[in-house]
Image (cartoon, rainbow, N blue to C red):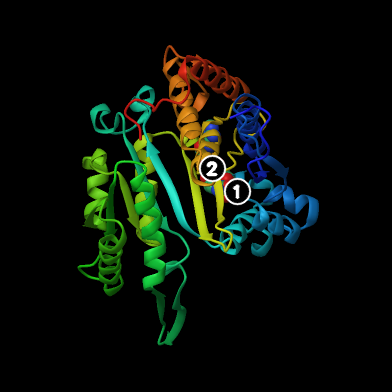
Amino acid sequence: MSATAKSLGTVLCLPGDGIGPEVMAEARRVAEWFAATRGVRFTFTDGLVGGAAYDASGAPLTDATMAQAMAADAVLLGAVGGPKWDNLEFKVKPERGLLRLRKDMELFANLRPALVYPALAEASTLKHEVVAGLDIMIVRELTGGVYFGEPRGITDLGNGQRRGVNTQVYTTAEIHRVARVAFDIARARGKRVCSMEKANVMESGLLWREEVTKLHAAEYTDVQLSHMYADNGAMQLVRNPKQFDVIVTDNLFGDILSDEASMLTGSLGMLPSASLGATDAKGKRRALYEPIHGSAPDIAGKGVANPLATILSFAMMLRYSFGLGAEADLLDRAVGAVLDTGVRTSDIQQAGKKLVSTREMGEAVVDTLGQLAKAGGSKQMAGAH
Ligand code: NAD
């Protein structure tokens, strides 16, 4: 690709609050390297979300920014929230900005990789041999299920008793669209999907299992499908997580299982995520990429935050919104190589390693990208998909 290539699409950048702008600056540094060196160029627009947007406009996300997000090919977000805005009324809290993005963009598939770089395997609370080289992807359904199902609510039964109700509900279409995302991702990785539910005790779980099985038989027989009850899945994730490639599950189980899986890696500052929506008439899929960590008010402004989760979110954007798998592999490999050299931000610091700032970590990734590109481009990271 030529270094003067035209823009591949529009990316709305929403750094947000706390460490958000600091880690976003390093993702942009990496983006600049791809533009200048590989001709992988995007048209970036900057916007406000969360507390920063509230301070500027009185709303955690303006209609104008929402419209930009809908029109963009991808949205890259930092983090929102902080003590400054903790006492705002509910509807203008920073988190409402993020929730509106997810809702209006109809982001139904949440992708959470759990990847343990060999250099960081000691950071996990699990034994080295259980997690070293771990590379799994959890696909969580994000817009349906018990968090949204009706009826819901708390009713007063009189006589001092109350009743709380939530409803777990899924339709064929909702199951198929998220399972399709999981099968497509598995095709580009280890070609295995494990679907998790509670088909033994829940009708919605039985429907989930039947529909995933039907879709698999009709369209994805090249991918190996297995099923597991979600409670067993939770145990297997800590017993032998490397048995999995892609896990697909509903909103509630996915909430729990993806947090469990992320903690296998032991480092919040390393974990990216993607949320994908439906494909529109022009074939464009709405998508939001963000680190899973929050705005870390305790370290904001100090220049010490780990930018790698945001840089890896940018890598997911290359892969899932722009089909640039080789470029994403190169970036994943650069992050691994930087860690191998012993460079660490404070959250992942280990004895004898070199402590660096947010900016220095970003620069180390860019330097390493340069070295890897010179040494032979985008070979697959050993052991990774
Ligand atoms: P947090 O993720 O911000 O921080 C938890 C701990 O991890 C802190 O000690 C922090 O310093 C550390 N940490 C997090 N990211 C780091 C990084 N990149 N590098 C180094 N250390 C890092 O969670 P919290 O403290 O519970 O929440 C703080 C604020 O963030 C709250 O206002 C919360 O609502 C918000 N939050 C936002 C999101 C989001 O934007 N998606 C997610 C979670 C929390």
Q: Which residue is located at x 20 percent, y 68 percent?
A: 200
For the question of whether residue 350 can be seen, the reply is: no
297 or 252: nearer the eye? 252
Check if mark 1's residue and mark 2's residue have beta carbons within 8 Å.
yes
Quarter of the view holding residue 238: top left
Q: Residue at x 48, y 20 (%)?
A: 338
Q: Image height check: is 130 above or below 316?
A: above
Residue 85 rendering spot, x and y as whole percentages: 68, 51
Task: Identify which residue is drawn at 37% across, 65% down.
Answer: 176
Question: Of the residues under marks 1 and 2, which one precedes in the sequence?
Answer: 1
Q: What residue appears at the point 60 percent right and 55 percent down from the top-left corner?
A: 98
How far apart are labels 1 and 2 at the CA level? 7 Å
Residue position marked by numbered label 1 in the rendering: 74
Q: Residue 257: image x %, image y %?
A: 34, 51
Within 10 Å of disc 1 (Cα), the crowding (few <14, some 14-19, many 20+) is many
Query: Horizontally, is 178 left or right of 106 in the view?
Result: left
- The kind of residue tagged 2 is Met
